[in-house]
Structure formats: structure tokens, C-alpha cells
Image (tube, grey):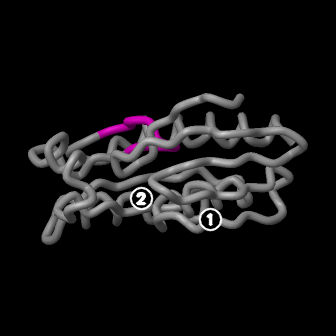
Amino acid sequence: MAGQVWEVPGGSWGFLVAGGGGKTWYARERTMIFCFLSRTVQLASASSLLGRLLCSASTNKPVLTLFTKKPCPLCDEAKEALEPYKRRFILQEVDITLPENSAWYHKYKYDIPVFHLNGRFLMKHQVDIQKFEDQLTKLEMHNDGNH
């Protein structure tokens, strides 16, 4: 719906400018994104994080965002724990120490690893496999029901 505002992982905000006829325009920091909602073609000329989030719609895979920094042994352990599930989601890592991610740094500097699933907080400090699997399965069932 035109006029809808949403938070983009990375702390940026987007604004839905216009929609209709299977096409949606998003404005974000002087960047326009054209997205065919038919799930066939997408042009994402914004940050790679936003681009990957939008492109995940074409694969129908949920996006698991890992807020991390280097080094982060707990993050490495968390990624290992998620390895058996890697074909069921798209992993997006956000380095909270980068200047463009300062909002995430202030929010999560004492909590990494932190995970969001499709833009919503899921877990922090360590992987809760049961919670992750439950939420992932819910999203997959929801996505399968929308086809």
C-alpha cells in the first residue's frame, strides 16, 4: 500500500512510493528499486543487504540475518549449528562495526550473535535450534500457502 514505511535491516528506513499492476516502487536513501511482484525479475540497485532481502522473495527462502563482528567465535559456532539448515534460508551477515551499521552496533554490541528472521528478532547469544526450526517451518508453510 502506498505510503507504507518499513525498517530495512541495517537501520535504514524505506518508503513505499507507489504500487499497482504487479509493480512496486521503493525509495530508500536516493535509490529507487523496481520490483516485479510476479517473482520473475527483480532489479535491486540499492545496498546488497536490501537487494538480497528483496531477491529472497524470488527464491521464496526466508532471510536469516546474523549481526556479527570480527572476530566472533560465538558467531562462528552459531553458523556451524545452522549448517544443516543452510539450504532452507538465505544467510545475510551484518558487520555491526561498519560505520553504516552504527545503529545496530549500539543496539547489539554486547549481544552478538544476534539473529533476525525475515527482519524480525529471533534470538541472541546462541542458537536455539528448536526455536529456529519452529519459526523457519512456519515461514515455509506460510510461503507454500501463498502459491
Q: Are marks 1 and 2 in contact (CB under 8 Å)?
A: no
Query: What is the spatial separation of the Cα atoms under label 1 and label 2, in whole angstroms?
Result: 27 Å
Q: Earlier in the sequence, mark 1 or mark 2?
A: 1
Q: Which residue is mark 2?
A: 82
Q: Quadrant of the C terminus?
A: top right
Any mark on residue 44, and which? 1
122 magenta-colored: yes
Magenta residues (range): 116-123
Left or right placement of residue 56 versus residue 50 in this view = right
The answer to whether residue 14 is left or right of residue 123 is: right
Q: With 23 as the anchor, is 119 left or right in this view?
A: left
Residue 122 or residue 56, whichever sits in front = 56
Going by the picture, which residue comes out furthest to the left?
A: 110
Q: Is residue 146 left or right of residue 97?
A: right
Residue at 81% across, 35% down: 145
Occupied quadrant, residue 74:
bottom left
Q: Amino acid at mark 2?
A: Leu
Q: Quadrant of the N terminus?
A: top right
Q: Position of residue 51 (x, y in %)?
A: 56, 62
